[in-house]
Every structure is written in structure tokens, then in C-alpha cells.
Amino acid sequence: MAIEIPRTNPTMSDVAIVAGVSHQTVSRVLNNPTSVPFKTRERVQEAIVSLGYHRNMSARALATGNTQTIGVLITSATFAGPSATLIGIEQTARSAGYWVSMAGLTSDNPQEAHDAFSHFISQGVTGIIAIIQTQSALDTTLNASLPMPVVFVTSGFVPESVPRVDFDQDDAVRHIMSILRGLGHTRIAHISGPLNDLHAMIRQRVWRELLLNDQDNPAPCQIGDWTAASGYKATLELLAARPLPTAIFAGNDQMALGSLRALGDACLRVPHDMSVVGFDDIEGTDYLIPPLTTIRQNRLTLGNAAVELLLEAIDGRPARHQIIPAELVMRASTGAANA
């Protein structure tokens, strides 16, 4: 007599009956497929497809205490860098069987961060990836007593006992300065991001350290806010001072874009009269006039690494820090210094 299985909301037991295996075997196929012989696994998978079976993740979470969800805390998603990192996190998490829940912070108010943590805890997330760009948010997150593993994506200081991933910001700035010096530039101005931003802080610090012994360079610096408009305004301020710089190192590509516009409006040729370097290699920088020399940071790789570190932490493996090399991309916006 044929076994009649209801096709509405089929259960794991229904799958087991159709596949001719035990309930436990179906569970192993779903949770640890390599532990089941291929032929058996194939029968179970065919039964799952034929029945239209979908796992009840809520019930599974109650039974195992694992929601297969990763929380992502981000202090800024308004620029290309953090947004691309989120894509890398989501893609890698999904391939590992995890979903992503995101909370964005709009200020440095610690209460906002605590509310986000409470939200993640109530969701039962398995772990948190914290993309931190300000010192205040970093301090708040480090001091929070969270009941799950946390991985930091940040340029700030994190103890060795806590997993962290970032690009090699220090080395990237050294590459920029080395190239500009090699082209004969000594008066190298800098347009920094906001001073409460950890990326801006380290880029400005390394730039200034490399100029300390250069008596010919007054180390001019203007502060922007990562936008093209602020880069434009900062460049006009640099052009109003004397002596003029021979090169401008902008803390990100958007500010470099504003700088190129300001130099054009001032009838200065790039790179003949002044060189410009950006940071991030956002989409379209190779189509600017002239194409922008910049630092390429593969944000998808960064997101991938963050998820891998979190999965290691979830498995109870020792914390580690991973620093990813950045790549200097030479284009036509840099040339020999012209006194």
C-alpha cells in the first residue's frame, strides 16, 4: 500500500518516511551532510525536494540555541567602504548557512550602542561583527559584556584576546608618501577625514610622522568630512596659503574628487601643476579626468575575513588579528613635482 504523505507543511518525519530512513538520518543530512553516505544523502535530498520541505528555523533555534544569525553593528554606512564590506559579510555568511541582522549607529551616544546590543541579544544572534570607525563606539563595544563572540573591523586598538581585522592603513600611507617623494614632491598637503574617525586619525598620524624631518614642508593639513564638497573647500584653503603644495594626499576618494574640481576651477593642471592621491579606489576613480591614483582596499575580502574570524570564535578557536595588505594603484593624477 502506498504511503500517503500530506503535501501541506511537511515535517522532517515525512521526509524520513519517503526517503526510507530514520528521523535522525534526515537531521544529519541537514546539519552535517558529510557524515551520511552519498546514496543515502541523495535519497533524503530528493525527498526534501519532492515534498517541498522547509526547515522550521524558529523550532531549530529553540532546540539548539543557535539562530544561525550574525549581528552586524556599523557606525557608518553612508560611504562606499562600509557598504561594500557589508556585501562581503552577507555573501560569506550566507555561504556558511548564516543570515545577517544589521544595526547602524547614527551617533556616538553609548545608549544607542547598548540598544543595538539589546536588540541582537533578543534576536539570539550567534555572534556580532562590529564595524567601528570612532573611538567612542570602540570603547563602548569593548566594555560591553556581551554573551556571544564579537569580531572587530576597525583601525583602533583592540586587545590580542579579541579578534580584529583591518587593512594595513599604516603601510598604505607609507606607500603613498614613498611614491610622491620618489616623484620629487616635498610639499605634500593632506586633507584629513573627521578627527573622531579612526581611519582619518591613523592616516593623518602616519602622514605627519613621515614629514617631521622635512624642513622644506610646512605640513599643511585641512580637515574634511569624507565628502567631495569638503575636499573642494579644503583644497581652496590649501591654495590660499603659501608656499603652495606640490601634491595633495586626500584621505578618501570622495575628497580627492572635490580636490580635482577645485584645482580645475583654479586653472591648475593635474598632475603638471599639482599631483593628487586618494584612498579607497571607489568605483569610477579610473574614469575621472585625470584617472585618480589611490589605495585599493578590497572590501569584499575584508567582509569575508570578518565572517571567517567570527566562525572561528564561535567554534571556540583562539582569537587572532588579521591585517590585510592594501594596494597602491598608480594612475595619471600623479606626476613629477613641478616647482
Image: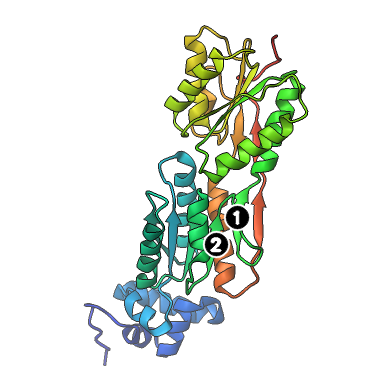
Mark 2 neighbour density, 10 Å: few (under 14) some (14–19) many (20 or more): many
* Image quadrant occupied by the N terminus: bottom left
Mark 1 neighbour density, 10 Å: few (under 14) some (14–19) many (20 or more): many
Location of residue 103 with respect to 265 vertically, above or below: below
Residue that lies at the very extreme toward the bottom in this rendered image: 1
Q: Disc 2 to disc 1, how far (Cα)?
A: 8 Å
Front-most of residues 95 and 211? 211
Q: Measured from the top left, where is residue 302 in percent x and y?
A: 56, 51
Instruction: Give me the residue at 59% from left, 49% from top.
Output: 155
Instruction: Name the amino acid, label 1.
Output: Val
Identify the disc placed on residue 151. Answer: 2
Q: Which residue is mark 1?
A: 165
Identify the disc placed on residue 262. Answer: none
Q: Is residue 321 left or right of residue 195?
A: right
Location of residue 120 with respect to 231 vertically, above or below: below
Instruction: Give me the residue at 55% from left, 9% from top.
Output: 268
Q: Is residue 8 left or right of residue 75?
A: left
Instruction: Name the amino acid, label 2.
Output: Val
- N-terminal of the pair, mark 2 or mark 1, is 2
- Res 322 seen here: yes
Q: Secondary structure at mark 1?
A: strand
Q: Secondary structure at mark 2?
A: strand
Front-most of residues 88 and 2? 88
- Res 131 seen here: no
Instruction: Give me the residue at 52% from left, 14% from top.
Output: 263
Q: Measured from the top left, where is residue 152 in percent x and y?
A: 55, 58
Q: Quadrant of residue 55?
A: bottom left
Front-most of residues 291 and 122? 122
